[in-house]
Amino acid sequence: MSVRVRFAPSPTGALHIGGVRTALYNYLLAKKSGGQFIIRIEDTDQSRYVEGAEDYILNALEWCGIVPDEGPKTGGDYGPYRQSDRKSFYKQYADKLISEGKAYYAFDTPEELDEMRERLKEARMANPQYNAISRNQMKNSLTMSAEEVNQKLESGEQYVIRFKMPKNDDVRFKDVVRDWVVVNTTTLDDKVLMKSDGMPTYHLANIVDDHLMEITHVIRGEEWLPSAPLHVLLYEAFGWQAPQFAHLPLLLKPDGNGKLSKRAADQLGFPIFPLNWTDPETGELSKGFKESGYLPEAFMNFLSLLGWNPGTEQELFSMEELISEFSLERINKSGAKFDIEKAKWFNQQYLKNKSNDELAQMLKAETNIDVDFELLSTIAGSMKERITFISDIVESGDFFFNAPQTYDEKTVNKKWTTEAVHKLTDFANEMGQLENISPEEAKEKFIAVLSKDNTPLGKVMPALRLALTGAGGGPDLMEIISILGTKETASRIRKAIEVLKTSN
């Protein structure tokens, strides 16, 4: 059977990067195996539905380069791909379990459920729940006569359908990441399968849809591991072959203490969503990785290594290489610390590997800068070794576009000397007589000016940089001169001399 995997987000808000990683791992396995990657929107909990969340999720995955073979927008032979459009599918399966004595109707009111929990607390039950013991004292089809049950159903009394958890039974299943998992049913409750509004819970809809869509591997977050025993029992109850399970490790805060949350990301000042997200209730804007300047390919490369180990020292992977190298067996059990500095490093590497023209095109697309494309490409090439984000070319390289209005005070105090001013004056005069100049020619002219009285390079170079850029450090100075041109270079030197006079 061909590998078929699904990513099944709920449209209850923005897509957390943990969800993006889950989607990525599903996608990588499908592509490596020549299988299908499916997106299914799990919107059975209508009370938590957030307007715009589904579109946000699909757009975010598209930006990441995670393109489904089947899904709400793509279509496919196993649709519909929204659970709310599949509502008619689920009741028949819940009824089948009831007819076979594997599930039951429960007519308990919220008040009666609260009373049950209070009784169990008073009896010092560590985990008060609706289970194989407490169900015998509740209002359900296991404690009522068939006549009473039919009467309640015919009268339209509200009910839920609960799974009848076996008593004191070991549930065993093999997880690709965690190996064998064994859980005794005494720790499990009789989960609701169908809610009183006629909608299935996640547990029933998830199992039915995975079966009908012929899903072969369920790759999901560690937080779903406690639900896996129930899911295994449901597969057994229906007589279906269960898929292979792989529960992914948590993404942890940078210090390793606890799960990475939006609050933690906000406090530490980095994004946690792929794209900008505006909370429809509060209007709060959460900045995304895209809008923060990250390239999608760098973001995917970074995220792929948070929980998966290629088994080599290689860190930079194209999507094609990730597909080729990926395997579920190399996913770690332990949580992965989120390191935003590493994310920045990946972005730096990907920007470095782009051509000057590609960087210039990105600048044109992302900024309103009005500069000749060829010149912009040259500036990008000069800056590419020093940038983390494409915007740094404009922000850190502002001096390429605008003459400095201020000068680094520390450099002024240390390097702006009478000797430097004399040499800069001579160099400005030389530049004023020339047209275009290459970096090599600029260096020759500068050295020639200094060699007249054997002035060391270090006595004047910092002052020259200060005059041209206003800063004490930056890209290759002779490249800057070549890009600015001889006339602008001379003009900036003279302006600096006029503004700063002689400090020493």
Image (cartoon, grey):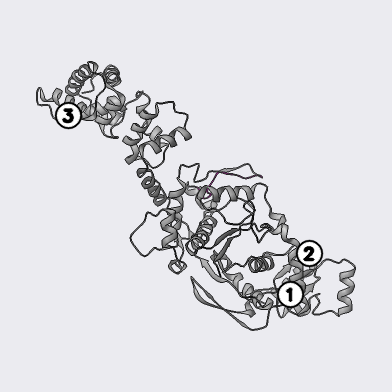
Q: Find out whether the residues at labels 3 and 2 contact each other: C-beta distance under 8 Å.
A: no
The N terminus sits in image quarter: bottom right
Residue 367 drawn at (x, y percent):
47, 32
How dense is the environment of label 1, judged by Cα within 10 Å: few (below 14), some, or many (20 and up)? Answer: some
How dense is the environment of label 2, judged by Cα within 10 Å: few (below 14), some, or many (20 and up)? Answer: some
Left or right of 416, for residue 178: right
| Residue 326: quarter of image | bottom left
Q: Which residue is mark 3?
A: 459
- Identify which amino acid the numbered label 2 is placed on: Ser
Q: Note whether residue 299 is visible.
A: yes
Q: Secondary structure at mark 2?
A: loop
Q: Which residue is mark 1?
A: 119
Q: Earlier in the sequence, mark 1 or mark 2?
A: 1
Residue 131 drawn at (x, y percent):
70, 77
Callout in the foreground (3, 2): 2
CA separation in Å, label 3 and label 2: 83 Å
Query: Which stretch appears magenta?
Result: 271-280
- Asked whether residue 276 is drawn in magenta, I would say yes
Residue 201 drawn at (x, y percent):
70, 65
Front residue of 193/72: it is: 72
User: Predominant secondary structure in magenta?
Assistant: loop
Q: Secondary structure at mark 1?
A: helix
How dense is the environment of label 3, judged by Cα within 10 Å: few (below 14), some, or many (20 and up)? Answer: some
- Identify which amino acid the numbered label 1 is placed on: Arg
| Residue 279: quarter of image | top right
The residue located at (52%, 68%) in the rendering is 246
Residue 256 drawn at (x, y percent):
44, 60
- Circle number at residue 196: 2
Q: Find out whether the residues at labels 3 and 1 contact each other: C-beta distance under 8 Å.
A: no
The residue located at (41%, 26%) in the rendering is 371
- Identify which amino acid the numbered label 3 is placed on: Lys
Q: Find out whether the residues at labels 1 and 2 contact each other: C-beta distance under 8 Å.
A: no
